[in-house]
Image: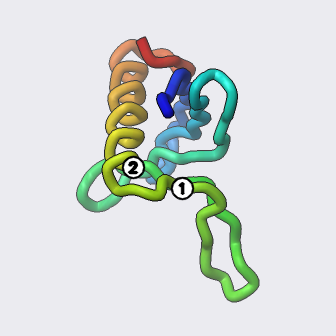
Amino acid sequence: MEITEININIRDEDKLKAFVNITFDDVFVIRGLKVIQGNSGLFVCMPSRKMPDGTYKDIAHPISNEFRQKMEALILSEYHRLVAEGTGVGAPE
């Protein structure tokens, strides 16, 4: 399964840096990922839902750590490219 499109909408907030939608094999999309500024740098949060007890549970997420790292690297690379260009929406090359 390959990521065939990454759409990023950059935000200008303290912690929330962008909303991300990713498409797999041009046939399946996941919306609502977020690029977050944490204490040790940027990271990607999966789409989540607030539970009745106040905690959050991911709605969709990678099963393997290897795929999570690949997905996060592609998203953050595209985010940095868009920030450097000063644009807000993009797709992988």
Q: CA distance from mark 1 to mark 2?
A: 8 Å
Q: Looking at numbered disc 1 in the image, what kind of residue is underneath it?
A: His
The percent position of residue 82, horizontal first and vertical second, equals 42, 20
Quarter assignment of residue 74: top left
Residue that label 2 marks: 68
Q: Residue furthest bottom?
A: 53
Instruction: Please state which of residues 4 and 87 is positioned toward the viewer in this rendering.
Output: 4
Q: Residue at x 56, y 37 (%)?
A: 20
Is disc 1 placed on a helix, strand or loop? loop
Q: Which residue is mark 1?
A: 61
Residue 85 to residue 79: above or below: above
In this picture, residue 47 sits left or right of residue 79:
right
Which of the image's four quarters has the C terminus?
top left
**Going 58% across and 40% down the picture, which residue do you hit?**
19
Find residue 26 and report its horizontal and vertical position in percent.
63, 22
Mark 2 falls on what kind of element?
helix
Q: Residue at x 33, y 18 (%)?
A: 84
Q: Earlier in the sequence, mark 1 or mark 2?
A: 1
User: Dividing the picture into quarters, in which one does residue 11 lie?
Assistant: top right
**Disc 1 residue crowd, few under 14, some 14–19, many 20+, Cα 10 Å:** some
Identity, as a three-letter code, of the amino acid under mark 2: Arg
Residue depicted at x 56% and y 20%: 89
Q: Residue 70 has which mark?
A: none
Q: Nearer the viewer, residue 46 or 27?
A: 27
Residue 16 horizontal/vertical position (percent): 50, 49
Contact between marks 1 and 2 (CB within 8 A): the answer is: yes
